[in-house]
Amino acid sequence: TERSRQDMQDYWDGDRFGFETSELKGILVADSDENPYNRHRTIELVHKGTGVRVSPEGGAMEKAGAFTIFRSYARQSWLTELRAIKPKVTRNKDGALLVWSPTISHQVKVSALFTVREPNIVDLDISVEGYTHYPDYELLLSNYVAPSLSGGLFVKKTSSTGPDYEHIEITDNPAFHGMYPFFPRDEHAAHIMTDGRGQKGRWYWRVACGRLYAFPMGLATDRNVDVVFMGRPEDVSSVGVTYSLDADTTDDNGVAMHHALYLSLFGRDMHPGDGWRTQVRLVVQTHDDDSDGLLSVFEQFINENSGLNRTFQVQPQ
């Protein structure tokens, strides 16, 4: 709304978009030659009401930042890392449009519109255009948070009493120590996450398949601030949440140090001429102990995007 726009303070400095809403302040890096592994990201993200910095600070994870389009995969295949590839950047008054053109190694055009909204939202509208056949095509989004925040999500509950979901936190366990816990939407999503795609390209990783997610969103909290990273249920194949450690536990694999929330998008066959569109939202808010309060944030996101088309016609180029 116009009132929301007036509340915001923002500026462009090179390819850095500094923003301040009534509840958040931070910097969206649309592109950066200084960090070739992480050309786009959100940094110095602070929840103003509590003063809590929710994006990583210090070390490799600060360079990785929050809210990036990370990797693209297909069946048993690693395609590329979009966060390491220079996009074409179009500046907007409330964010930026990043576009990656098709290449031989990744024959998909990806358009990512980042928009900062009052009071505490960063939205992403993603469009992909296919120019070849990729079975089980996937875009993986990452959102790294400060070490003080622990990750969790809502999963489906097997019990027949009460709600059919429960909120769980992901802590280290010998059964998946050194692995990245992911929680699929369905059996197909569970199958593709372990088809070998994670053992190709650089930075191999092994995924531990958890229970079915109940809602396509990852959560991170320090009991003062909640970070909610969400997508559309039709398009989120799985939700990833790295585990937190006990004080006496070591983690030679470095999984816990990521403090990460991941959204795996699509996970379905792409054919030449396919045009897909979806939305992802990052919300940072004062902590809410009530599950209904967290779910209301998701419901608002779904309601706001319910009328948007999920497919489009690819135009000749």
Image: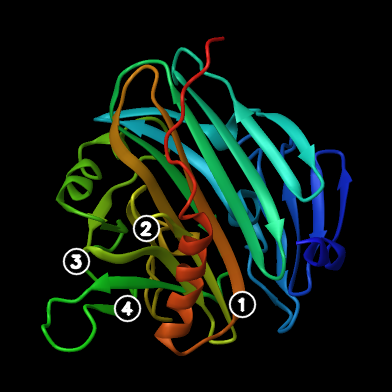
In whole angstroms, how far apart are the C-alphas of marks 2 and 1?
Answer: 21 Å
Location of mark 2 (residue): 240
Res 269 → quadrant: top left
Tag 3 and tag 1, C-beta contact below 8 Å:
no
Res 22 → quadrant: bottom right
Instruction: Look at the image and tell me whether residue 259 can be seen.
Output: no
Tag 3 and tag 4, C-beta contact below 8 Å:
no
In the rendered image, the vertical position of residue 183 relative to residue 234, given as above or below: below
Q: What is the x, y in percent for residue 76?
A: 24, 30
User: Quick one: SS at disc 1?
Assistant: strand
Q: Amino acid at mark 2?
A: Gly
Location of mark 3 (residue): 175
Mark toward the viewer: 3 or 1: 1
In whole angstroms, how far apart are the C-alphas of marks 4 and 2?
Answer: 13 Å
Tag 4 and tag 2, C-beta contact below 8 Å:
no
Q: What is the x, y in percent for residue 144?
A: 54, 59
Q: Is residue 200 left or right of residue 22?
A: left
Mark nearer the N terminus (3 vs 1): 3
* Residue sitting at x 42%, y 84%: 292
Location of mark 1 (residue): 285
Mark toward the viewer: 3 or 4: 4
Location of mark 4 (residue): 168
Mark toward the viewer: 2 or 1: 1
In whole angstroms, how far apart are the C-alphas of marks 3 and 4?
Answer: 17 Å
Q: Amino acid at mark 3?
A: Ala
In the rendered image, the vertical position of residue 293 relative to residue 315, given as above or below: below
Mark nearer the N terminus (2 vs 1): 2
In whole angstroms, how far apart are the C-alphas of marks 1 and 4?
Answer: 19 Å
